[in-house]
Amino acid sequence: MDRRNFLKLCSSMAVASMLDTGVIGRALASQGGDFKKYEKALLVKEDGTPLKVEDIKPHTTYIFFYPFVSTPAFLLNLDKEVGPVDLELSDGSKYKWPGGVGPKKSLVAYSAICSHQLSYPTKDYSFIDYYSPENPSKTTKRSGVIQCCAHLSIFDPSQGGKVLDGPAEFPISTVVLSYEEGKLYAVGTLGVEVYQDFFDVYKRDLRKQYGSSRKAKKKSKECKVIEVSKYAKESIKC
Ligand code: FES
C-alpha cells in the first residue's frame, strides 16, 4: 500500500473509531429482524445486460449497491445449498433467514457495511471481504466467512450473516434476492439495518462522491454487479 492510500485508510479508521456505538445499539433496539421491502431492482452485468447465474463464479466476492445507490452489498455464490436458518438477536427477537436462491439455492447477498462500526468497501480499499475456502484468513484461519479487518468481526454467509466471532453484536443484514425466469432481483432487506447510521457517519464522503446527501439516498432501480477486486483498488485481507 502506498503512503497516500495508507493515509486515507488511517483517516477512515479514525472515523470508525470515533463512532458512537450506542447509535448502532439503537438501530438494533428499534428494528428487530423484519423483512423490509424496497424497490425491485434487476441485477445486471457491467454492460447492462441481465446477470445470469452462470456469470457468478463460486466463492468470488461481487459488489452492487442496494437498497440505496450508495449502500454497498456483497453477492456470493457459495456453491452449495444454504439455509434456511433461524436467527436470534441479542434482544431476544427472532427471524428466519430464507437461505440461498437460484437453481442450487447457493446465491446469497448481504450488506457490505460491517454491523460493528460501519467499515465498508470504498473504491480505494476494502477492509471487509469474503474469504474463500482456497484463501482462508491468515489471522483467524477461517474460510467461507465474511471477515472485517477493522476489528475482526466474522460473519457466516451460509447462516444468514450470523456473527461467528469478534465485537459485532448482530448479523450483517441480508439483501433479499428473488430468482425469476433466469434473472436475479434485489427486493428488500432482512435483519438489522444500519443505513441511517451509515448516512450520518459518512455524510461528507457521500456528498463528495454523489454530489449531495439526497442523491446518495436515492433508491436503486437497477444494480450493476462487479467483482470487488475490480471495484476496490486494494483489498485488505487479514
Ligand atoms: S468495523 Fe469493527 S469489526 Fe468491522
Image: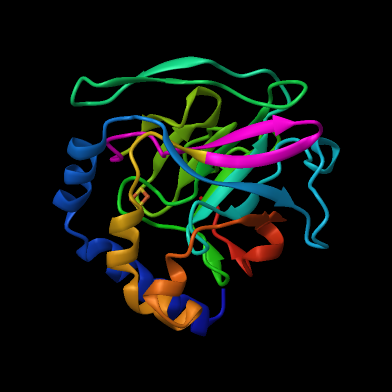
Q: Position of residue 211 (x, y in %)?
A: 46, 83
Q: Position of residue 55 (x, y in %)?
A: 83, 43
Q: Position of residue 28 (x, y in %)?
A: 23, 38
77 vs 105: above or below? below
Quadrant of residue 95 in the image?
top left
Give left or right: position of 49 versus 235: right
Instruction: State the residue at coordinates (42%, 65%).
Output: 217
Give left or right: position of 5 versus 64: left
| Quadrant where the N terminus is found in the figure | bottom right
First to last magenta residue range: 167-187
Instruction: State the residue at coordinates (52%, 62%).
Output: 69
Work out whether residue 11 or residue 65 is closer to the camera in this orientation and state it: 65
Give left or right: position of 77 versus 53: left
- Give the number of marks: 0
Magenta stretch: includes residue 13? no
170 vs 43: above or below? above
Work out whether residue 16 or residue 26 is closer to the camera in this orientation and state it: 26
Instruction: State the residue at coordinates (22%, 61%).
Output: 19
218 vs 36: above or below? below
Q: Position of residue 173 (x, y in %)?
A: 42, 39
Instruction: State the residue at coordinates (35%, 76%).
Output: 11
Work out whether residue 44 or residue 78 is closer to the camera in this orientation and state it: 44
